[in-house]
Image (spheres, helix red, strand yellow):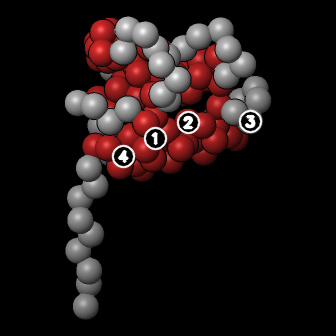
Amino acid sequence: MTRVRAPETDGQLLDQIADVCRWYAVAGPPTSQRQAAALTELAHITTGRADLLARYAGQTLAWHGSGPDATARERAVQLCITAGADMALIEQWNRETQRRNPDRTNRRPDNDQSQ
């Protein structure tokens, strides 16, 4: 008997995108092999959902600062852009996330499941 897999929610997909981006970004300067692996994984996760890549990138930019993880966040955003994130949607998510969280609490963007 073949099991039918339930469709994943956007929140679950965003969590998976965050995991891949963290894996890629925190390992130091990217190698072509790591980037290819990350892009392949993101393509598998998103199956054409450039809007989710843009959402993660925009939320990550909104939380971007000068702290110790700033470089890793920049790498994660660039990976999403390389994977096909819609640039206009990145800006929209960046503005929306900043508007909703003007005080920029310590909550991480990959835990923000707001719509």
Name the outermost residue toward the bottom. 1
Mark 3 residue crowding within 10 angstroms, few (<14) / some (14–19) / many (20+): few
Residue type at mark 1: give it.
Ile
**Which mark is drawn over residue 21?**
2
Give left or right: position of 34 versus 77: right
Position of residue 69 measured from the top left corner of the image (x, y, whole percent): 67, 22
Tell me the SS state at disc 1: helix
Position of residue 41 measured from the top left corner of the image (x, y, whole percent): 50, 47
Tell me the SS state at disc 4: helix
**Residue 43 visible somewhere in the drawing:** no
Q: Which residue is mark 3?
A: 27
Mark toward the start of the polypeptide (3 vs 2): 2
Give left or right: position of 11 versus 83: left
Tell me the SS state at disc 3: loop
Cα distance between the residues tagged 2 and 1: 6 Å
Position of residue 100 measured from the top left corner of the image (x, y, whole percent): 30, 15
Position of residue 84 measured from the top left corner of the image (x, y, whole percent): 40, 27
Indicate the quadrant where residue 89 lies.
top left
Residue type at mark 3: give it.
Ala
Q: Front-most of 48 and 99?
A: 99
The residue sitting at 43% across, 44% down in the picture is: 15
Q: Is residue 35 above or below residue 101?
A: below
Labels 4 & 1 near each other (Cβ < 8 A): yes
Q: Front-most of 1 and 110?
A: 110
Q: Image quadrant for the C terminus?
A: top left
**Which mark is drawn over residue 17?**
1
Mark 1 residue crowding within 10 angstroms, few (<14) / some (14–19) / many (20+): many
The residue sitting at 38% across, 32% down in the picture is: 112
Residue type at mark 2: give it.
Cys
**Which mark is drawn over residue 13?**
4
Labels 2 & 1 near each other (Cβ < 8 A): yes
Cα distance between the residues tagged 4 and 1: 6 Å
